[in-house]
Amino acid sequence: MKPTDLRGILRYVPAFRDRIFVIALDGVIVSDENFANLLLDVAVLRSLNIKVILVHGAGAAIAAEGARRGVQVSDIDGCGITDDVTLDIAVTAANRLSHEILKGLAGHDLRAVCSNCVTAGPLGVIKGVDHLHTGKVERVDVEFLNRLLEDACVPVISPVGMDGAGGNYRINSDAVAVAVARAMGAIKLIYATSYDGLVVDGELLRQTSFSELADVLKTAGRVPETLRSKSTHAVEACAGGVPRVHVINGLVDEGLLAEVFSNEGIGTLIYGNEYQGIRRARKSDIRTLRRMTRAAVESDELLRRTRAAMEQHYEDYYIFEIDHNPIGCVALHEYPEENIGELAYLYVAPSHENQGLGRKLMKFVVAKARKRGLKKLLALSTQAFAFIRNKGGFQIGQEDDLPAARRAQYDASGRRSKILYVDLR
């Protein structure tokens, strides 16, 4: 099912209705042919009573305008020194982009206002360097923005702030988005970029906590410089109370909806509070578990179990959830007469493979078995035995390692699973 299908969207709506999303658009996104599709995604959010605030950058437009005028701009991203000429170019470029966004929203019958809700001040002199017209956010007019949202308007905020005394300042749009999201109590800050997400050590990062990302940023070179601003401001947003920050490719058709309304997403999710966890299954979860693992059972990766048997022992099963949506599971069966446990039913959805979740499930069961005082933990597998051995620290065992009751099941199944074990003493 596509994430944009109605049923896929509706299960998220209760948590998002009447809440605020801040969507930060890199300037290059506004100039791309996919921008109309992204605004259509915004229209879908508004139709579901999700309040949307748009913040846009202007770096690409500033560079282009500077080239058109034959001027070397002093700063592109609002972090360096903004001289008089660059400020003039930034104001021109930002106003043009704001107009394009307003025009695009009007094309989807959405009311919008280009707001001067951000009060700015000078970044000042840092390490002896005067940053001239580069600014920082001093205040966000929350009352004004709330009135616009209650009146079904989409506020559009540019990366040029004013100080109330006639001064203009070029501000980094990533920082503006963080300030607005924090001030407005947004539940999501979504950075729409020209990248597929954050890259750490050369690999696309799918999800991480803000504290883990903060640790990554302490070491130079782990995050490309082109993504360092997004990474740094994502950490700042979560530390300031924004629960979720997403970094997505805004050039992908339906990318915004795919990120917001599916477990898998398309980019990187940085979370600031509990995002994923393992919980014990309830009897009502058995149907979900069977549906989730159907393909693995049919391919003989998992042992076929009857629904009645699973419901009878439902307390043996555990579910790995992301935002209350199941994406993995595991079971711990016990043989108390021999003080042995069995790690079973280990499964992670294909969309979340290679993210360390299987290892977390194994570690969870090992810890649970050890806490219960079991002396040995078994695992039987036809296809994942190498993973269990290499990532879980299990050793290859023999049939003699099986409890008597389990040995009878093993012989009757005919699956000839590899037997593995770990000593818990």
Image (cartoon, rainbow, N blue to C red):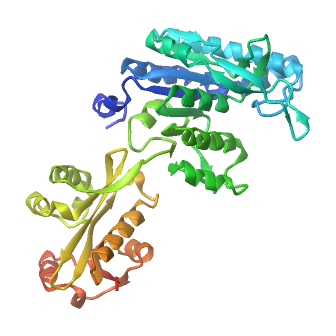
Asked which quadrant contains residue 348, the reply is: bottom left
Q: Residue at x 21, y 49 (%)?
A: 288
Q: Residue 9 at x, y = what percent?
A: 33, 31
Question: Which residue lies at the image location 32% right of the left edge and 82% below the top edge?
Answer: 421
Residue placed farthest to the right in the image? 128
In this view of the protein, which residue sits in the foreground, 423 or 308?
Answer: 423
Q: How many marks?
A: 0
Query: Percent x, y for residue 271?
Result: 49, 45
Q: Residue at x 39, y 75 (%)?
A: 386
Q: Is residue 204 visible?
A: no
Quadrant assignment, res 232: top right
Query: Is 92 on the left or on the right of 28, as rendered?
Result: right
In the depicted view, which residue is nearer to us: 391 or 132? 132
Instruction: Please identify the quarter of the rendering in which residue 17 is found.
Output: top left
Residue 236 in the image: x percent, y percent?
Answer: 61, 41
Q: Relative to 315, does residue 183 appear above or below in the rendering? A: above
Q: Residue furthest bottom?
A: 400
Q: Nearer the viewer, residue 364 or 389?
A: 364
380 above or below 214?
below
Residue 399 appears at what percent x and percent y? 22, 88
Is residue 278 visible in this depiction of the protein?
Answer: yes
Tell me if residue 48 comes above or below residue 420 in the rendering. above
Q: In the rendered view of the protein, which quadrant contains the C terminus?
A: bottom left
Image quadrant containing the N terminus? top left
> Left or right: where does residue 291 sit relative to residue 57?
left
